[in-house]
Image (cartoon, helix red, strand yellow):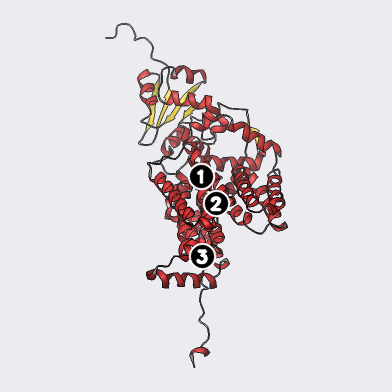
Amino acid sequence: MTTSQRPPRKGLPAASTVGLVFLILALLVPTVFSHRLLNSDGDVARHLVLGRHVMEHGIAFPDPFSHTRAGETFTAYEWLSEVLFALAEGLAGLPGVVALGGLIIAGSLALVAAYLRPRLEPLYAIPAVFVAAALTGPHWIARPHLFSFLALSALLVLATRRPDLRRHVGLGVLFAFWANLHPGFLYGLAILGAYLVGRVVEDRRRLGPAVASLGAASLGTLVNPLGWGLHLSIVHHLQDQRAFEMVDEFQRIDVTSGYGILFVGVVLILAVLLLGGRRDLGASTLLTVGAGLAAALVAQRNAPLFGLFALPVGLAAVGGLLGSWRWARLEKFRETLVRDDRRGTTRPWVGAGVGVGVLFAAVLAREPDLYPSASGFDPDVFPVEAVARAQEEGLGDLRMFNAYAWGGYILHAWPEQRIYIDGMANFFGSDLMEEYVSVINGVPGWEERIRERGIDLLLVPPQAPLVAEAVASGEWRLLHSDETASLLVREDPPGPEPAGTA
């Protein structure tokens, strides 16, 4: 049999760049980064509790979780994402939450790869996707903002398509879902607006399609249970800037940190490439990169969003420049990547990634001890033992002062207890947050503040100044203490010594 007569080899189809990115991340994120997904932020547990509550009571209800804001109307802006995470937990416990978070992250970066695939050779597109992954990595937390990652990546693909009816409808549908998933849809509208204005500057004939696209996206955001009320409520909460100033993710990037150095390095390299390939530079690229960079410089939580939209748009603009570079030692490797990507498929590998995520969750739901970091909250991060002791002692009826970062965990693990505060800074407001800071630091007057609130239970880190102050006052008994948490209960102040005692 001649070579030409040999039957084709059977086996797995080659993976496209998009399929390869999705599969790698679907495997990597839940296994390597499961601890980050669950334990980097106390709000993970809060959102799971909210998701269950929304399914029973709707998206607006009198606050049942805290004693400091009891009865005030709470609106679950992120209701759909919270419900999805809660459903994942209901089906497979915390491993289900980890698996869902991993699939969202994998999908977000696969969409970035899908955008870059026709615009950038795989030799550059693949590293670019993993640079975007590095920029988003510190925010790989199983919270609703992950859905903004996915929606923004979908916007990247949709906004750059031919401006026809399908694009307009697609944008409307995307933003309808986005408005129910996370308030990041406002960022999406701003970035879409910047990109479309740039396209109009490049060609005025694009004005009509640009207006139609932005209009469809804006109308899509009204498809939510509150209508315009959603937008007004978000703007209302944004007015309390003091509350946001006290939350780390709303601070500016620390350029001396490892992440800050990475971000600055990426921006500088992109700037050099854009200047080098200025013949390919257009207003849409300038405005998109500029708007994304400005938002990232205002608040570090926007840096990942820069990596998911502005960075790919900028790199696509210099695709011709990068494609003209030839490295002799990498030429065969480059040709192999191009060939495999052209003949590669996407859907089977995406399906395999989804299957891996489902299998991961199903196995750990039955055998959580196989991988504890994906199956429970870390007792070195959250007050697991202290809460268990408080439940044993039947202290659920006492009013509690708790550490800010632990509020969500307490709601999840100790549902009968009402908290003092948690990570919902926009709901609790700056006044309570400032009170919290003064109390936990043992600032003079802390006793009066918590006595006025009827607080008889303290659950804070052992190194908090409040612990030493409370013990020294003689009114508090240390019921439990470990390396993570101290639990103190109020006692009656000591009375005078009986007569005749030494």
Closer to the N terminus: mark 3 or mark 1?
3
* Badge 3 amino acid: Thr
Q: Position of residue 33 (x, y in %)?
A: 44, 52
Closest to the camera, between mark 2 and mark 3, is: 2
Q: Position of residue 286 (x, y in %)?
A: 55, 49
Instruction: From the viewer's side, name the closer residue of 116 and 426.
Output: 116
Closest to the camera, between mark 1 and mark 2, is: 1
Instruction: From the viewer's side, name the closer residue of 373 and 29.
Output: 29
Residue 18 higher or lower than 145, as above or below: below
Q: Which residue is mark 2?
A: 309
Closer to the N terminus: mark 2 or mark 3?
3
Q: Which residue is mark 3?
A: 17
Q: Position of residue 319 (x, y in %)?
A: 51, 61
Instruction: From the viewer's side, name the closer residue of 341 and 38.
Output: 341
Q: Secondary structure at mark 3?
A: helix
Instruction: Check the image and name the residue furthest to the front.
Output: 279
Q: How crowded is the residue under tag 2: few (<14 C-alpha within 10 Å), some, or many (20+)? A: many
Left or right: 201, with 309 as reference point:
right
Q: How crowded is the residue under tag 1: few (<14 C-alpha within 10 Å), some, or many (20+)? A: some
Closest to the camera, between mark 3 and mark 1, is: 1
Residue at x-position 51% and y-position 20%: 454
Instruction: Check the image and name the residue furthest to the top.
Output: 499
Task: Report the Cα–Cα distance between label 3 and label 1.
Answer: 27 Å
Looking at the rendered image, the quarter that the C terminus falls into is top left
Closer to the N terminus: mark 1 or mark 2?
1
Residue at x-position 62% and y-position 38%: 76
Instruction: Check the image and name the residue furthest to the bottom.
Output: 1
Q: Which residue is mark 1?
A: 293
* Badge 1 amino acid: Leu
Q: Position of residue 23 (x, y in %)?
A: 50, 62
